[in-house]
Amino acid sequence: MPKRIYIFDTSLRDGEQSPGVNLNVKEKLEIGRQLERLGVDVIEAGFPIASQGDFEGVKAIAETLTEPIITALARAVKGDIDRAWEAIKGARKPRIHTFIATSPIHMQYKLKKSPEEVLNQSISMVKYARHLCPDVEFSPEDATRTEREFLYRVIEGVIDAGATVVNIPDTVGYMMPDEFGSLIADIRNNVPNIDKATISVHCHNDLGLAVANSLAAIKNGASQVECTVNGIGERAGNAALEEIVMAIKTRSDYLDYTTNINTEAIYRTSMLVSRLTGMHLQPNKAIVGSNAFAHESGIHQHGVLSHRKTYEIMTPESIGLKQSQMVLGKHSGRHAFEERLRELGYTSLDKKEIDEAFTKFKVLADKKKHVLDRDIEAIINQKAIEVPQVYELIYFHISSGNTLISTSTVKLKCEKGELEEAACGSGPIDATFKAISRATELDIKLEDYSLRAITSGADALGESTVRIRENGEIFTGRGVSTDIVEASAKAYVNAINKMLYELG
Ligand code: KIV
Ligand code: ZN
């Protein structure tokens, strides 16, 4: 009987700490719902003391989702623990996750505390958390650079104090797989009460070893792994959920473990997280990159056509990537469109949502000969997380060329009526952004801009992601169109609307 491994997803906490990522409450809830469909065991929904937005995001998830354990992070201090508890206490299965650094370098320079002080604080704060919540996880931050004997004492102390889970973080992604595996084995052999708690691991990817380290830990007795969708997270990120899960599934001959993950929901979860965080995937990203199942060379194509397993160790279908034989175009009717939506897994749309999507599909099919699955996903996802449209793009006109100064005229609609403005810029997109800023009378600080084709071919849908900064916070907007200036203008207006919605 394979041993069950618990998947702890921290996309909404450690993942959201990725530079430039800022999810609002609706977006967090949307990701939370999808993680529940994916079948994760634990969702770390945020760090409530960090901001009001974080607190509300955690609370909304705690009060909405019913299946997974909902946890929130807290430093090992009363104020943080109280705030975390306040956010998660409405959950069906709440867990407080508290941490303090235990490595010499962190204790001396960051905490300015002696090891004895850190040990006492760990124990007293776990006890404090346990009097609020029956499930308490403790993390000795930077465990992999902590002196062994001290690490064992801290773990023993917090388990005696009531910790139900002890998490061993490789905070700076420093370990080698066999070394990390041995650390977990040593903890099991040297902490007398270790069997009273679940051993968890939390690996960062600074040396590209987060997944390998997590698997080595599992082989040595860890039963919970902390990971993020697409491996997002601080610096080089965290262990990628989809890689750990598919490694366990694909190599079940070697790894005698099982998870609760519905692997067919992996692809959609990955797309959702990528879209809402604005963190695009490299094409060769394992499992979910656009090339992960593409066979380019003639030899490989020939092999796959003769027998898929020649070059495919897992199927695209196993992660929910369906390859349709049916091509939709402008002659396709509503029935075929609905059928395709169903095959793609969009089974919870109501009639109004399908009507809206079908109208958009028809507009797109007039511009594009073949409407592919990714186009349909883009249509559906376009509206997923809407904020009130303070401004709406009515039209834009551009005049541009390699011998001209680009100019753009835009018309926006808002509560006050219609606003029209024009501006020059160093290209049509720059001119359009400037005209929009003028029309809204906002001093927008553009932080980042990107444009990519969602599908292939000259008539592909373009997706633009715009990040703007206000009050030290980042707001990410997204726009999709077959016209790249329109996609960019929509993304810019979407980012402005999100900023106004969030900042009130
Ligand atoms: O990387 C880390 O050490 C963490 C802890 C708070 C678990 O994220
Ligand atoms: Zn971390």
Image (cartoon, rainbow, N blue to C red):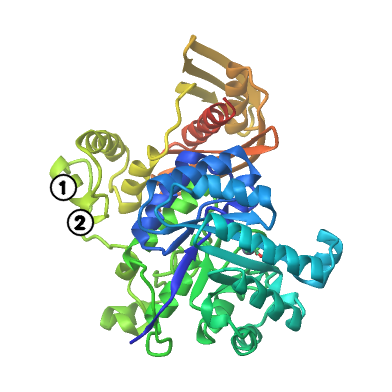
Which of the numbered marks, if any, corresponds to residue 283? Answer: none
What's the residue at 49%, 53% (across, down)? 274
Contact? badges 2 and 1 (CB < 8 Å)? yes
Q: Relative to 294, does residue 212 appear above or below in the rendering?
A: below
14 with respect to 351 (left or right): right
- Left/right placement of residue 26 relative to residue 15 reads left
**Amino acid type at mark 2:** Met
Q: Which residue is mark 1?
A: 336
Q: Residue at point 75% right, 83% down?
A: 149
Asked if residue 103 is positioned above or below residue 40 in the image, the reply reads below
- Three-letter amino acid code of the residue under disc 1: Ala
Q: Quadrant of ligand 1?
A: bottom right
Mark toward the viewer: 2 or 1: 1
User: Whole-Å distance between the Cαs marked 2 and 1?
Assistant: 9 Å
Query: Is residue 397 left or right of 503 when viewed as pictured?
Result: left
Compared to residue 475, the image places residue 242 above or below, namely below
Can residue 504 be seen here?
yes
Of residues 448 and 107, which is closer to you in this image?
Answer: 107
Q: Which residue is mark 2?
A: 326
The quarter of the displayed image where residue 119 is located: bottom right
Neighbour tally class for label 1: few under 14, some 14-19, many 20 plus, Cα within 10 Å: some
